[in-house]
Image (cartoon, helix red, strand yellow):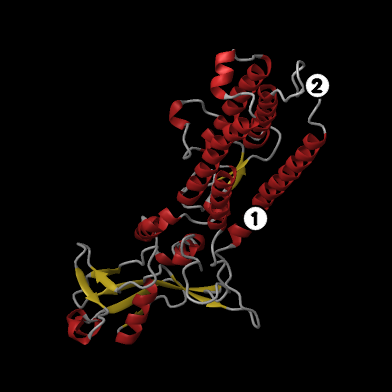
Amino acid sequence: MAFAGHSCFWLAVGALDVGISSHTSLAGLVLLAGTWHWAFWDLDMFVLKQVLSLDLLRVFGIHLVLASSACFSFGYSHLTGALGPGFWTTDAFGLVGQVRGLKPSFAMTTLSTDSFGSLATHHLAAGCLGCFAGLWHSSALPGPTVAVAFSVSSIESALAASLPPMVLTASMVSSTAWYGAASSANELFGPTRLAWDSSGFEQELTTRSTQFSWPTSPEQLLLYDYIGSNPAKGGLFRSGPVDNSDGIVQYWLGHVEFLDPTGNSLTVRRMPTFFETFPVILVDQAGEVQADLAFRRADARFSFESRGIRANLEGGMLGRQTLQTASLVKSLARKTQLGQIFTFTQVAGLAVDGVFRTSVRGWFTLAHSLFTFGSLEGHI
């Protein structure tokens, strides 16, 4: 039976489809609105009655009200589940995700990106504040001094003033998506780079193994504890064509525990994110180096042969086996650098890399970052 770690991922694709369709629809509406404004810019509601020129403050107020209304409607109807299914929520390790309505919480401690309730709160509060500000800007005109100071009659100033909110929002979205937030669940976007750098999944698996056993470890959590799930590593930093990557996951071979002749447990140091090659080093509980794969014969005093390192496998296809052959133990140590050990398969006749090119999180961050810098540099 093939490895089924992506079952929850494909169940969650439907939630992404809703986001894709909503963004596509909004982009189409914005395109139609731009075409309509191009043809009917001189309507009475947009121009000053004294001279034929755009009333930029009223235009700004109208757009702010429309945007705030959409923000409030999204928060009330979708996020709270009042008129829709709700929002995808999950635990810190992406194992128990489900769609549910979010209960708004207006406590100051929940105004963060780590709380699900804050997502609904942000949209409701921003919608109300934006509508109030938009109506005020549409009905109130500044004095001559303020108008001259802020160049409210200049179309260039109006366009420049629209850049900071857009750039700030896109930068925040890119940052929170890359490093993790409540709005970007692991099932939908893949694990964060921070999870690999902090060994979050490795520590969780170790904790679960002490309470239960390695064969009972969740498959999805095992798959997350592989460097190919890191959005900064999946295919982007590999040599050769990007579609010649790992392949499609087939089997989990098991968790490897390295032991010295006295029975002390040794751990392989994981591959850092922005490294392609890294020395294979085995350390004990105190962090002291006990064995390594030497680059030179003269540095072989910590070699696996001289140290008598053996490997025990628990769970997976090779569970309940002990390997003492130096070549096999070295091979397992090299693979353990990349996290959990899997076998991969390629589709016959096709160059396919499965899901390990980069995750949705990587493409999301890249696209929004390019949008941010492109808009900023282009308008400046």
* Label placed on residue 13: 1
Q: Residues within 10 Å of mark 1 (few under 14, many from 20)?
A: some
Place of residue 268 in the rendered image (x, y in percent of width and height, measured from the top left): 31, 69
Place of residue 368 in the rendered image (x, y in percent of width and height, measured from the top left): 57, 49
- Vertical order, 64 against 198 (above or below): above
Give the position of the C terminus as an image quadrant: top right
Q: Is 212 left or right of 170, judged from the image as shown?
A: left
SS for tag 1?
helix
Residue 131: quarter of image = top right
Image point (53%, 21%), residue name: 149
Looking at the image, which is closer to me, 46 or 89? 46
**First in residue order: circle 2 vs circle 1:** 1
The residues bearing labels 2 and 1 have C-alpha atoms spaced at a distance of 46 Å
- Vertical order, 86 against 275 (above or below): above
SS for tag 2?
loop
Residue 94 seen in render: yes
- Residue linked to disc 2: 44
Tell me the amino acid under the disc marked 2: Asp
Residue 288: quarter of image = bottom left
Looking at the image, which is closer to me, 301 or 57? 57
Q: Residues within 10 Å of mark 2 (few under 14, many from 20)?
A: few
Image point (56%, 78%), residue name: 345
Place of residue 91 in the rendered image (x, y in percent of width and height, measured from the top left): 49, 47
Pointer 2 with pointer 1, Cβ within 8 A = no
Q: Is 183 left or right of 257, judged from the image as shown?
A: right
Give the position of the N terminus as an image quadrant: bottom right
- Vertical order, 109 against 380 (above or below): above
Looking at the image, which is closer to me, 203 or 128? 128
Looking at the image, which is closer to me, 272 or 30? 30
Place of residue 58 in the rendered image (x, y in percent of width and height, measured from the top left): 69, 22
